Amino acid sequence: MTKPLGEFRYLTFDVVGTLIDFEGGLVDCLAAIAQEAGTTLNGEQALGLYRAARYMPDVQRFPDDLARVYGVIAPQLGLPVGEAHAARLRASVADWRSFPDSVEALASLAKRYKLIAMTNAQRWAFTHFAAALGEPFHAGFTVDDTGTEKPDPAFFEQVFAFVEAEGGSRDQILHVAQSQYHDIGISRRLGLTNCWIERRHAQPGYGGTIEPEQFTRPDYHFTSMAALAAAVDTSKAA
């Protein structure tokens, strides 16, 4: 039986793709470059090429890796190559927007839970993301802090140690994320209750996120952060 929403103490969050519209930010920047070059961009094609390039053997930490990724995908998209355009894609991260419902939902959830960010992004990028989200987090863990990326269990173990140092436990955590590959599958294997925010519910495929080997049925499933916040309010009222 799934644990009721009102019984959790912590909500841990994937950030990029769950709270921050990384696909929109990525495509917007590439589309602007394409327009300046006198061509057009197929957004879904760009996301598929990004996904393949992002998981090559020589990857660097995200989002610094976007400069390398641009060099890989630009010729395939008919975009101009060069260090200036590659740097522009990396720098665009600072302006990536939150999903329209993220700020309000997080502010509401922060009244009831301690919110912890768990992002595969570097600290410099997370600083921008947290500001765009209204600084709602009790704590934040980045790839720079953990030295590894989700779905590595070691990333989660560092968060568990933090929670335990505060007198909490992993059974008081609800892990909220959009990525089946990076978050939902591994959170299930580690015994966490999880909540899948299916941001691409109206679109086929996995977009810019790597496809999991197998789908994990989540404990909770919503298509937006607003729906999660509303469900928490309903649970509280009950």
Image (cartoon, grey):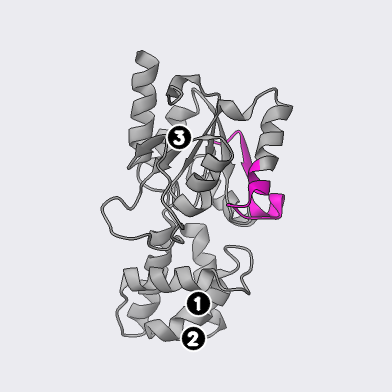
Residue at figure coordinates x 59%, y 50% from the top left? 127
For residue 25, which quarter of the picture?
Answer: bottom left
Q: Residues within 10 Å of mark 2 (few under 14, many from 20)?
A: some
Q: Identify residue type, mark 2.
A: Val
One can see residue 202 in this view: yes
The magenta segment is: 136-156
Residue 202 locus on image (x, y percent): 26, 53
- Residue 9 falls within the magenta-colored stretch: no
Left/right placement of residue 96 relative to residue 170 reads left
Disc 3 target residue: 106
| SS state under label 1 | helix
Give above or below for 10 relative to 66: above
Residue 44 locus on image (x, y percent): 33, 68
Disc 2 target residue: 81
Q: What number is the disc on residue 70? A: 1
Task: Return the disc, 3 or 2, that comes first in the chain's sequence.
Answer: 2
